[in-house]
Amino acid sequence: MKKYLLRFGLVGALTFLGLFIYFYKTSGKFRQSIITAFVIVFFSSQQPAHSAGEADAAFTQQNQPHQSRSSHRSGFFSGRSSNDGSGPGKPNDDGSDGDDGGIPKYPKTESIEETESHLSTIDEQINELEEVTDSDSETEEDQCQIKPPGKFEVDFDFELDENENPTLIIPMKDGSIRRIEFDKTRDKWYHEDLFPNISAPDGFDNQAVRDLKYSDRLAYLRENIPDKNFMELQNEIGKSLSHPKIISVPGFLGKYKIEGTVDINMQSGLVSFTDGVTNKHRTIVKMSPERIQKLAKDGFHIFPDK
Amino acid sequence: MVNKSNVSRYRELLKKKDILEEQNKFLFDDPDYLELLSYQATVYRQIYFSRKSDYCSLIKKYLNTTIPSHKFRARFLEMVKQDDEKAEKILQDFKQLSSFSIDVNLDGFSSLFGRISNNCLQAFEFGPKNDGYGIPEDEFRNSIEEIYFQLENYLNEE
């Protein structure tokens, strides 16, 4: 009896608290909310449940929300797996296979311990499912970031172009991206000397290649440098662009003032231009402080005029 | 003449730049950073100026058609690269910097030299196409001829 009175008191207190919060939130009046909540709790306690048996029934009623919450969780599972196990709140899960005429037959009331046991089983299943989902997404991410098939490992996401060569997607601090294309990088591979980490093929003479006519230089680079070296340069340009000491400024390129972004790596003095419409990286050059000073004076316009 | 007091100012400006970078400030709006750039640029200019006869000789060879345009550009840019590396080393070595001297006001030289250097770089990077990026060969030659004429006059007046 004492136990039931204690439980009843607890339920009353919780109900009072709930009602008070509700009224206080809606009306904003503290004293009025207390009085209203108290009156409601007081009058509802004058209803039946005078005996221990009635109190027990009332307490069982209070457990119903547990069942509806479990039902919601089983709905969460239904999209991903064929979970047909029993659980609280699920119709027709009492093991009987009698004809019910299509009317759902709910289980008999279960004890708190049984409900808790079911809930913990569901929680475990959710955790397992979340772990599997996490490891799946990590695998996809790894595949996306690491390497174009059979070629060079890169540190950035990439897309494959029509020749199955990668275009690296470089995320910038401000949320924008730079697209470093394979073909463009290939034609400017002589810039490998800007990056100490790049390995040149045996016998490659940078100055001799720079001495060639423009068209001969392009032909030489396209025919003589392995693809993996171009990707290595793409990756190094990407690292330079994502360096913490990058300053990105709206700027222009060439006679026709193509709009885009000038990225200045303050550590190395490397200056890049990226087209503002296509996000394609156009060029990278090393600039002395004198040239950077001039660039700033020109409104970050690279090669403004002849 | 870049004397000791200037070097101490240079060190001060370098520290200020680090602070500005830590604070994620936009450097090009800051007068101290612009002063730092000017200071560094002065050293680069002096290095280029000290090799003016080599640069002029190379330009003359190109204009006299002793060497083709693509070789001229590559050589010119290679010389600039060598000088840039030299200037970078001096700016990192405060002892050397404290004894580094500036001969004259080099603004006029710097402007003309910068235009030649810029044209060489643009033609080298983007080729001879007239697409807004590259420079056709005849335009390139005319521009170098014109700038060199001004440069010669400037140097003769010195």
Image (tube, rainbow, N blue to C red):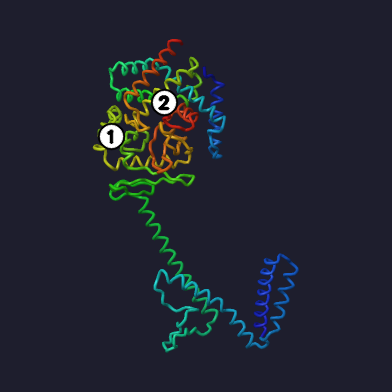
The image position of residue A67, as x and y in percent, is: 53, 77
Q: Nearer the viewer, residue B16 or A90?
A: A90
Q: Which of A161 and A85 is in front in this view?
A: A161
The amino acid pointed to by label 1 is: Leu
Q: Name the residue under label 1.
A: A218
Secondary structure at numbered mark 2: helix
The single residue placed furthest to the left in the displayed view is A223
Q: How far apart are marks 1 and 2 (CA)?
A: 26 Å
The amino acid pointed to by label 2 is: Asp
Q: Which chain letter goes with mark 2?
A: B
Can residue B148 be seen here? The reply is: yes
Q: Mark 2 points at which residue?
A: B84
Q: Quadrant of residue A37?
A: bottom right
Q: Which chain letter goes with mark 1?
A: A
The image position of residue A298, as x and y in percent, is: 48, 29
Quadrant location of the C terminus of chain A in the rendered image: top left
Quadrant location of the N terminus of chain A in the rendered image: bottom right
